[in-house]
Structure formats: structure tokens, C-alpha cells
Amino acid sequence: MQLEPRPRPPLGVVFDCDMGNSIDDALALSVLYGLDGKNECRVVSISTSKPSLRSAAMCEVIGRFYAGAVSGAFSAAGRTLPTGMAVKGAHPEDTPMIKAVLDRVGADGKPVYQHGIEKLVDTAEAEALIRNAFTSQYDQNCVVVITGPATNFRKLLELPGIKELITAKVRTLVVMGGKYPSGGPEYNVKLDIAAAKKLFAEWPGEIIASGEELGEQVLFPVEAIDTKFSWAANHPTVDAYRAAEKMPYNAKCWDVTAVLQAVRPKEAYFKLSEPGRIEVMDDGRTKFTVAADGKHRYMILDPEKKAAVVEAMVELASAKPVVRQRRFRPQNEQKKEEKKEEQKKS
Amino acid sequence: MITKKALPRRTFLRGLGAAVGLPFLDAMTPALSAAVKPPVRMGFVYVPNGMDVRNWNLDYEGKLGQLSRIMAPLEPHKEDILVTSNLTHNNGRALLDGAGDHGRCCGSYLTGVQPRKSAVDIKCGISMDQIVANEVGHKTRFPSLELGLEDARQAGDCDSGYSCAYTNNLAWRSETQPLPPILDPRALFERLFGADAGLTPEEKAQRNKYRRSILDFVQEDTKRLQTNLGPSDNRKLDEYLSSVREIERQLERAEKDNAQIDPGMPKPYGVPADFAEHFKLMTDMLTVALQSDMSRVFTFLVTREGTSRAYREIGISDGHHPLTHHQNQAALMEKVSQINTYHVKQFSDWLGRLKSIREGDSTLLDNSMIVYGAGLCDGNRHNHEDLPTLIAGRAGGYIKSGRRVVYRKETPMSNLFLTMMDQMGVKVDNFGDSTGALDGLALS
Amino acid sequence: MSHRIWRACVIVSLAGLSAFAQQKPESAFDQTVKPMLNRRCFACHNDRMASGGLNIAPFTQPNSVAQYRDAWEKIVAKVRSGEMPPKEAPKPTQEQIDAFAAFMEAEFEKADRKVQPDPGRVTARRLNRNEYSNTIRDLLVVDFRAEKDFPTDDSGYGFDNIGDVLTISPMLMDKYVRAAERISARAIGADPLPKKPLEVEFSGKGQPLRKIDRSTVELTHEIGWDAEYQIIVQLPGERAADAKPVEMGFWMDGKLIHKMMVETKPSKLVYFNPMSVEEFKLALPEGDHVFRVAFINDEFVKTLTDKEARDQKKNKYIGAVTFVGPFAMKGERASRKKILICDPATGKACVNKILSTLARRAYRRPVTPGEVAQLVKFVDYAKAEGQSVEQGLQLAIQAMLVSPKFLFRIERDANPADPGKVHAISDLELASRLSYFLWSSMPDEQLLALAEKNQLREAGVLDAQVKRMLADDRSAAFAENFAGQWLETRNLDSVKPDPVKFADWGPDLRDAMKAETRLFFENILRNNRPMSEFLDADYTFVNDRLARHYGIEGVEGPEFRRVQLATDQRGGILSHASVLTVSSYPTRTSPVIRGKYLLQNVLGAPPPEPPPDVPSLDEEAVGNKGSLRQQLEQHRSNAICASCHARMDVLGFGLENYDAIGRWRTMDGKFPIDVSGTFPNGKSFTTPAGMRKLLVDNLQDFTRCITEKMLTYALGRGLERYDRRTVNGIVKAVATDEYKFQTLISEVVRSLPFQNRRGEVSRRREGVKGKEIAGR
């Protein structure tokens, strides 16, 4: 029986990345699942704009590592969360971090990390996946995080009625892209300028941008890789980290900042610019114009909070997976108790 | 429809079922003889409570080889069917509306929208068959035909607060007005071939004249009534009016063609107790209707969604719905598979009859596209992705059959409908939750 | 909930208590209610666990009474019934519970008094199939069976007379047009019969003749006209020379309409095959009918082997039935007497008179000269077409029967758009509400006349009318339609018990079951018995078939009679085979369905829907692997299900002594039946009779339940929050009058919503509502 008022459901997060192009997509997704484990949010959609089955497979590997074959948000429906993937886009090629994770085999010669993506049809049409994720969210209880080129969102924004849906469901879009205030041009934007233009021009709601300049100053302490993850015999993010660049290095965390801002705005990890409008130029540069009615802002590093950010990042990225059971399902031993009682009765 | 008076009607009806008989086009419609393409017919055959997907799914793509256990009866028509996988109806999902997947999956099946969760204040969407009927319906005597085999339950709520209107109907004329399927063979017979076979043309003309005068009269009446009424009351009278107008249109069409179609069978009485018999009787009449171009659009709700019908015909005395919640108990799953296969068998036999009717150098089946499927994937899990679906017929050549096509995950079922509407000559940019047309039906 | 989880709760609760420690200042609410909530509920219904989707925190604020009224009502109900707190949790004392409940009740009433009473608004109602048939019967004296060819009416809130739900499809419209043609033609009978009578033979070669048994055949035939038909029965074969004559009967739709003696010994005539023919002429009504021809108590065939039975030298049997007709009927038909109050041939004046009289009754209100003129036009039209005046009248009647004024019951308001404007419905509208409530048909002359004179609301008139209408036979429709849907006995037509497990099942038993419940209901209705008899009575109504089913001795013959019950095996609707059958699976009983049935139709506390993947029972296992009870209790060890099943199953098991078609039993397969159970309030029972006693003890709940159902049926709309006061009022009034059943009915008729209506609130917001997060 559903009695009003309901307990407030966790925040739904739609995550779109270019997994494989840089390590911080992997770190960002790990952090996201760390937050999911703390019931601060639910990952309700994962998609990649890197047109590569291997990139999608890597997303699924990390998803399964934390959420199991059936991911938490969908366990009620008993279905796996499919991975969205762009069919056309930049950088289809394989990268060392992807190879390190997908091609790693154990002593038995079998892959260490399982995933279910062999063919194109094992992935989902990203725009459909994301739209459907929106439809199952409570009003204003969903955030979107984009950490790669906006390729998938270009198509999404062409769906009929999508703007109304976004307005109803999505609180904030946090996008890693652009450079502020200088203007870039920045990597993600350059990879798909047309998409970036459309995104900033047509997205109906609030946008918070994390600029290139911010992530460059937020570094992931490499020693954490050795110390904090020791609980896991094999950890895809760790393997990826070691392979992504020449060890030891402190990874730049553009994407992770976007995740933290999206799920923990109250922590005020970062300062925000005054409202304005972000415009994408033909050459991929971004132009920010202050405007009282503007729906766009960009994140600014807050030196006082920097330590806290790094701490949170490390803690969440290295958090253990939380096995989420169906509510009220009684533990086995207790089932046995009750059975005993019945036998007594009958 | 245009018939040559000279042609003894019985002759062409031999075509029904039997392999002999004159080709429909040449014999019946000089207006569109051999040179002209036969019309494409579109239909939906809906089976309830999902399927035992273990025994439905195929493990390969492309050309159809070994069929699954449930599809096995379709072996003789392998070349005429296209099996699709991964088509999804997102609007069948809870989307925060809680329990009631049966109500939702049937209500959203052809409408592509999420039905409002209510037992009385029903709101769905206009179904795609009706969109097509509105466009091409004027060309035939009946814009569309709605058939079913199970009488709607008489009292009580249908699924977790969803009105029976959602589980008992596939076709929706408007957001609030479902089109109930005809269940009684007798009723279908009379609707198709007229309750008044006995009347002379003069008597009929006279009667139709009177009917018109009465319909005019009641429309006047209604307009006068509608002044100063509340919205709900007005809605009811609008429903009444639109129905009156539909009857008028039917009269006009009937007057244009005095052709008496002879069903080539006696008027049936009562509903056969045996499922297969009932299925055959209804589809026999449907076949005549399609063959003689009385209608090009139909929906066939085999049994109500969520039905608990028992199939004693094949020795299953438990209700269908309770069985589908088998919790993976082999004994119960076995029975579900048997029911699924039994349904497909009836469908397959019917395809045989459609195939036996020649139209020029093709067959009635070639010129049809008939979707056979369920609104739920696995009846036990109540999931709405990868709906068991196959398309029989070639839509006049567009569809390259004899294959299994697997689509990407989450591909909307509505995309298929968009493409089917296009084949029926109805161009719309989007439908329901479609994200675009569906490729892969024609070989790409 | 399990002990384990409960312990978890306690810990949380301590934290919770402190959270509410510093609430000031102390109001009555704070003293009586808040402590209870904090101590007894918060442990599980808190922000983190929100068991059952309920977080109690917001309810600790006095203003929550107004804010979350529905939720509050549920909470109070659960606490009063003892269902909450769960048995593992420490229980409050009865005093605390009573104080809590009493205080909240008072709060509710206070809250109610603040808002102005709202009668609600009923959407225009289309006549449903029963109402249509009955109205045709009372208007034109024509026997028309809408249920035979109109599509099933959709039902809402458990009834098929709900204005919002009754739609019109083109298919139904088509039916209306055709029905109007046939009905008017039958009423006036002006169309000439075919010159030559037609002949239809039912036999081996002709139309199918169904063999029911050795001396019974059945056939379905469409009679084209209300007219006389000659029936010819061919009887092949002959019996022994000393064979006695046998009585041959002829039934139409289950009614015996003709009997005659038939000679069975060899006729002296010479045949290649012995054969005789019997003929008789009968007036038959137009339409589809099932005819049956049979030798009545034909003892002789029982002595034959199958082979002999088919041997023309050994036996005489029914070989073929032929209908020849139509032939003009002798004598004036009743419908003409009713309609042709003068001779239309005499001219316009009479035509006017006929049509205005008819229209007034068809539209259930006085008609304007303009309206009559409209109808008269049809007569002129037909004449212009060269037809007779009477055929013209037929046409006019057709028009009347298709008009929305006939098909709909529309009620008017001065300002339809202003929900604030409450007004009494007109006497005429009230008359229709009454007649369709109690008769499922149009008002009769007396009612209509009173309404026209605006005397319906004069002192005592309404009550007198209700009494009169209940005494009238037409009130059988009330038993048929209200009781039939409330108790779901209508579904008897669609249920199909497994013929293997229940060989007894058949039409005769099914009809007997229906009859019992109908007669029982009518008895309480007509004799104004207390409603407790629904739940427990020492009498019932049976015929020989049902008596055998119940194991009641000494009942002979097919006619029903009242019997005093010797044992307490039966008594009240919950022991009626009808109710027990519709609440079972085809193959077995279902304590769950029966429990749900009781909660829904007797206690008025329908359970929530189960989760999507509810485990079903292993059919084979029931009765051999373990008793149904054991199986269900295992299934209940799943806590998700347990919470509600605890309620349902106790009630359901209380009826386990009756099998899936209502036979008394003491074993389930090879396991003894265990009926015993305990209600949430701690009272327990060991037999069905015991449970019935407990149900009678809280007659309040039952009365509320039936009141809600009846109000829904009477108004033709679902009940809204604002109807709660009406329901409470009626329940009180009925209680003070010893729960007399007729009191309930007249209270419903007196009630605010039955006598008043208001403008409409502009369309409520689309779907979205439920999807927003409350209390954010």
C-alpha cells in the first residue's frame, strides 16, 4: 500500500562518457558507483560516445564490478542496465587502458572481467536508452553528467517531446567541456563541435560546465591506487589506471569533478560563476557571456575545498561494491526459523 | 468494392481455404486488375501474458533455419515470416505507476503511450491501426475490424487499478474510446455480410433511406442537448455523435456498392466451446473480408491480456495467467510453452489459408503484414523489452521474409509501427515513443 | 515483519524518539497522538525504512490531519483492527488504542465540519444492457434481450452502471439502430409477413440437431417474426407392442411451453422404416432461441443398450424437428394494446396523442409540442414513401429509441461549470434515479406523475414510493444487478470448474446456485430483515439439485423453497455455493482469493496488489506434497507477501471446509482441513460458523462496506473523499434502526448525493500528480 507521503527516492544519474580516451572517465564512473553505494544516487543510464564496442564493454565491466550482472537500479525489474553507444563519432580506436582491462586473462586463460558485449546489438541506441531512463525518474530528481563529446545528446535533442521531458525530470546537466573563462578550444568540444553547439544552444534546463582548466588542477594521488584498492584482488579501474599512462602519475580529474558537482551540490566543493550563457564557436572555442537570466554557469576551483575534493574522490572511487538486496527479503536462517514454526503448527 | 454482376459470387469464394478458385484481382476488380498492385493489408494478432521465452527465442540471426519449439508449427511458412528481437515498449513499464504490467502492456501496445492508471477515468492514445484506418479506411467498407476470442470479464477491476478497457481492447479510436473486439462469430458474420441477407435491394434502399433520416434527426437532437452541459457530459455526447457519423459513413459506402458478398458459409450460431474451432471460424470470416477488400486493417486480441483461461482442449486445466507466474517450476513452465505453441499452431494454420488465396501472381499473405506477438516478454518477469514478435507476409514485397532480425537494445516497438504505417501509405514523423523508422525489414 | 527486522527497528527508534523530544508546545494532539506514533510506529515507519512505503514523521504534526487525510484514515483503521503494530511489536493497551482512535475520529469530524457538504456530480449515464432491456419491456411490452447482441458494458468500481465508464462505439451504435428497427417492428407488427411460410428442418441432414441424451435433442433457431409457427417432430422407430405412450415436451430457452402424449407402440401403418410424426402450432417471439424436444421421464430407454436405443425396431426416438412459418398471430399483441391508445387511421390528432404519450415515457419527462412535431414528421415521411400510418409510427418509434434522450440519462444544472453551485436535482431526474436504482428501468406512471406535479419530495412520499417499488416484482432487477455484481455471482456464467475434478458442475447446478443467492437477497430485501442475516442465517433457499449438493435431506422437485438449516454448516452468503465457486480456481479452492473477496466485498478493506513476480502454487503438490495451508504458509515466509496475506489467508482458510464448488468437506486431498484462525484483534475461531459469528460481531464494518457499494451503484459513480460523511451518516442511521436492510436503501435515497448535484470541476491534471515527490 502506497501511503503518501513517500520516502524520497535517491537521485537518478544519467552518465554519458567517452570511456577509454582518458582514465578519468573510469574514475568518474567508479566515484559515481561509490555514491550509488551510499544511496546518494542511482546510476540509471550509462552510455559512451566513443563508437567502439570495446569502449561500451569497458563501461559494462565497471558497471558489473559494482552492481553485478543485474545493476541495482534495475534489479526490481530484473533486467540488466544496457549500455548505450554512439555508432558514429570520434576516436573509434582501441586504447591501452581498454586493452589492459578487456584483454586481461587469469591463470585459467579466461578473461578476468566479464561483460556481455560482442555485437552491436548487445548495445543500446543511446538516445532511446537515455530518454527511457528519464521517463522512469521522479520529477526534478534526475541529473545528467556528460564527460565526453556530446555526440549522443545531439541525437537525443532531436527526439519529439524530449525538451518537455527534460524540463520535467532533470534538475541539472553537468558537462565536462570548454575552457573558462579563456575559451579553449577544449578536447571534448572539438571532438564534436556540432553536438556541443546544439547542446549549449538547445538544452532546456540548467547547465553547469566543468572546464579544462579546473580538472587540470585536481589530481588523483597515485599512491591511493596502491593503498586504497588493496581490498580487491582485481579492480578494472586500477588496471586501467596503471595502463592509461606511464606510472607513476597523478591523473587529471576533469570528469570526476563533474560527477561530484552533480551528486553533491550541497557540499559546494566548487565555486560557481555567476549565471550567463555559454556559446560554442565554429572553431570549438567556448564563449561565456554573463546574463542575469542565463541558465549556464561554470565551476571554479575553491582552494579551501581542494583537499576535501581529493579526499572524497579517493574515498568514493575506492569504495567497495554494495550488494543491494530486494527490500524486506528475509535472511535465509530466519526463513528456516519460520519453517520450523510452521511444522510445529501443522 | 466493385464486382462484375456476371460472376457468380460463390465461385470466387471457393478461394476460401481451398487452393483452387479464381484470383481475386482479375475476377473481382477490373478497376485494379493484374497491372495494378494489390492493396496491402495490415493486421495484429496479440497473445496475452507474454511467453515462455526460453522456448520462443532463436539463438541465431539471419536466414531462418531450425525454429524454436513454440515457433515450430510455422515450419511450413518459414519463408513467409520475419522474426524480430529486442523491440521494446518503454511505456509498458511502470515508470513510477507501480503494479499493473498487464494493464499497461496491452494498453500501450498499439498506442505507444503510457495508459493512465485508473479504473474509470481511462486515458490512452489513438492506436496506430486507427491512424491508418482514418487514412485509408474510406477506401473499404469497414475502416478496420476488431476481433477477439474471449468475452470480457463482467464485473470487477482488471489489473492493479487499470480499467478492463486496457486489457480487453487493442484498438483505440481516441484517447478515451477503445474499440471492443467482436467475439461472437455470429456478430462478426452479421457485421461483415449484413444481418439482412433476406432483403431485396429495393427493401434495403428503403431501409437505408429511413436510417439516414433517423441519424439526421438524432444528430439534431444531440446538438440541442449539448447546450449548457458540463465537459464530461459533453464528452459522452461527442462519443455518441462520432459513432453516429461512423454509421452514416458505413451507410454511404454500403450504398455505393450493392455487392452482396457471399461468405460461402452458413450463418454461425453461438460461440464454439473449442478454442481452435472458434479461432478458425473467426479467421475464416476475416479471410473473406481481407480477400474481398472489405477492410485492410484488423486487430485480433486472441484472448484478454492477463486472462486466466484454461486450455482443456490440450489438457491444461489451470488458468493461463496463474501458470505464467511459474517461478521457474518446470511443470508449470511446460504448460505455458504448450499454450504458447497451441496459439502459434492456430495462427500457422490460418497463414496456410491466406497463402492459398492467389492475387494475380502473388498471394493474399504476400500482400499482408501481420504482426504476431505479445505485449510482455516473459510473463513471469513482466518485462517489456525484447517483446516476442514476428511479422507474417511481405507487405506486397517490401518485407524480405524468412529471416530473424535482431535490433539494438531498447529499440522502440513504435519504430516498427512507424515503418508499417509508412507501408500503408500513412506518412507521420513520429508515433508513440518512436525514435525513427525501423530498418532491416527490407534487406539493407 | 520478522523478529530480526523488528529488533533492528527498535534501535533506530531510540534515535527517532530523541529527534521528536524537543517538540513544543503541548497540544491535545501532542499528548494523545504523538506519543503513540513515536513509541509504536516510528521504529519502522521512519525516514530510512519507511516500511510499507509509510514514513510517519509528517503525521506527528497536527495539521497532517487535513493534509494526509486518506493516509490518516488507513492508519487509524489499522491500529483499531489490531493489525498494526505487528504481533512481534509491543502492543499498546486497548485503552490507549480506543483513546487514540476516538481522538482521531473527533479530529476527522472537526475537519469535515469545516468544509461545505459536496454532493459530487454524476456523468450522463448511458442505459446499460439490462437497463435497456427492462426499459424496452416497460415502455413497449416487447421482450428484447440486449445481452444477446450488445457488447458487454465496461464496469468500474465493480458495477456496470458507472456513467464515466459506459462508452458508445460505432459497433454499439450499429446495434442500437438495428435493435430499434426490430423492436419497433415487433411492437407495432405493421410489416406484412412473407407471403409463403418458410420451412427449416433440423436433423442429421438439415441444420444441426444436438443430441443431449437418448430422449432429448436441442437446437438453436432464429425466429424471424413474432408469429405462429408450426412445429413438426419426426419420430423414427417403434417400441414393443405393449409399450406405453410417453409424454413429449417442447422447451424454449429453458422454459417448457408445450406438452403432449406420444404413442410409441407399432402403428398399424406400413413403412419401410417405422416412423410417426407429431405436429403443433405455437406463437413464438422473434429472435434467437434454444429449443429442446424431449420425452419426459422416459423410463423405457433406460432399459435399452446403446445399440438397441438406435434400433428402429426396438425404440422410438426424436429424429428431426421442422419449423414452418410464420403464420399471422391470432388476437391483438400486448404491445399494440399499450401503444395504440386510439386508432391512428382516424388522423393526425390520434397520431399526435400516441407519439406524445410514448415520447413522454421514453424520455421520462414531459415533452414539448416541438419534440412531438419532430416525431410526427416521420409518420408523414413514411406515408409519402407509400407506407401505412402504422409503419410510419414504427419509424417514429425507431427514431425515439435511437435518440440520446432515450439512451442517456442526462441531468441538468444551471451552472455546469461552477463546482460551488450545489442544487437539488429536479423531481423528474429524481424519479429516474429511483427507478433505475431499484428497478433498473424507467419510472412507471405513478412515479412519473408525482414527479411532474413536483410532489416527490413532499413529506412521506419518497419513503412510500421506495416501499412500493421494493414490493413490486421489478425490484428483482435490484437483486439481479446489485447483488449479482456486489457478490460477483454474475461471474458464475464465465467460471469453468474443471469437469474432471468436479463432475457435478453443470448448467442446472449453476442456475440453482444463482437462484439461492438471489432469493436469499430478495427475502432480506422484501421482508426488511436485519443485515446480519447476510453474514449468518439459520435458513436458505434450495431446490432438489442444490439440496443434494448441500447434503440437505427431503427436498424434492425443481422448484425453490425456504428451508430451516439443521446444522451450522451453512448460513449466510459466505456459505452459498455461488459465492464459494466464484471465489475459487477452476481446479481448487484459493484461500487467497476468498480472503481477498471477503476483505473487498464484506469488510470493505481491499488488500493492495501483489508484487509482479508472485510465486504461484505447484498444482500437483497441493493435496499430496502438503496441504494447501502448509503450502501457502511456506509462500508466506516471504516477508513481502506475509504482511497482507496474514489478513487475507485467515479469512480464506475460514472457508476451507467448502470445496471449489461449495461442497462441504473435511479433507483436502489426503490432508485434514484446518479452518482455525485468529483475527488481528485477537479473537479466534475453529469453524466457518465460528468465523461468521465474529464477522457478525463487527457488523459496523460490513454495513460500511455494503453502504459504499450500494451508494456507488445508486449514484452510478465512484465514491470520493467528500462522500465519507454521507457514508458515516447512513451507517449511523442504519445502526440505530437495528440494521434493517430497507432502512439502508431509504437512507441512500435520502442522502445528499442522491438528491443533489453540482457543477463540474474543470478537468483534473493529467497523470503527472502521482509522480511528484510528496513532502519534499
Image: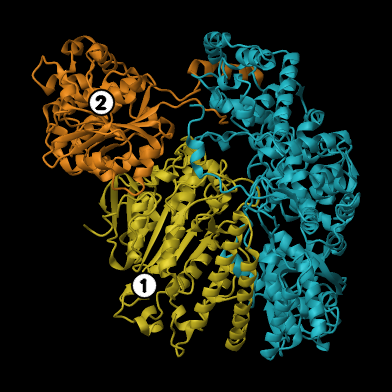
Chain A colour as displayed:
orange
Q: Around disc 2, counting alpha carbons within 10 Å, would you say few (fewer than 14), some (14 to 19), or many (20 or more)?
A: some
Asked if labels 1 and 2 touch by Cβ distance under 8 angstroms, the answer is no
Mark 1 belongs to chain: B
Using the image as rendered, state which of residue B255 and residue A334 is in the foreground: B255
Using the image as rendered, state which of residue A241 and residue C18 is in the foreground: C18
State whether residue B208 is above or below residue C73. Answer: below
- Give the structural element (helix, strand or loop) at label 1: loop
Q: Quadrant of the C terminus of chain A?
A: top right
**Residue at the spot of label 2:** A273
Between marks 2 and 1 in the image, the one whose residue lies nearer the viewer: 2
In the picture, one chain is cyan; tell me its letter.
Answer: C
Mark 2 belongs to chain: A
Residue beneath the point at 54% across and 35% down: C616
**Residue at the spot of label 1:** B39
Q: Quadrant of residue C539?
A: top right
- Give the structural element (helix, strand or loop) at label 2: loop
Side of B431 relative to B162 (left or right):
left
Residues marked 2 and 1, same chain:
no
Percent coordinates x, y for residue B301 in the rendering: 50, 57
Can residue C626 be seen here? The reply is no
The image shows a total of numbered marks equal to 2
Chain B colour as displayed:
yellow
Percent coordinates x, y for residue C473 in the rendering: 86, 58
Percent coordinates x, y for residue B331 in the rendering: 49, 39
**Between marks 2 and 1, how big is the CA–CA gap?**
63 Å
Q: Quadrant of the N terminus of chain A?
A: top right
Residue beneath the point at 79% across and 36% down: C729
Amino acid beneath label 1: Pro
Amino acid beneath label 2: Ser
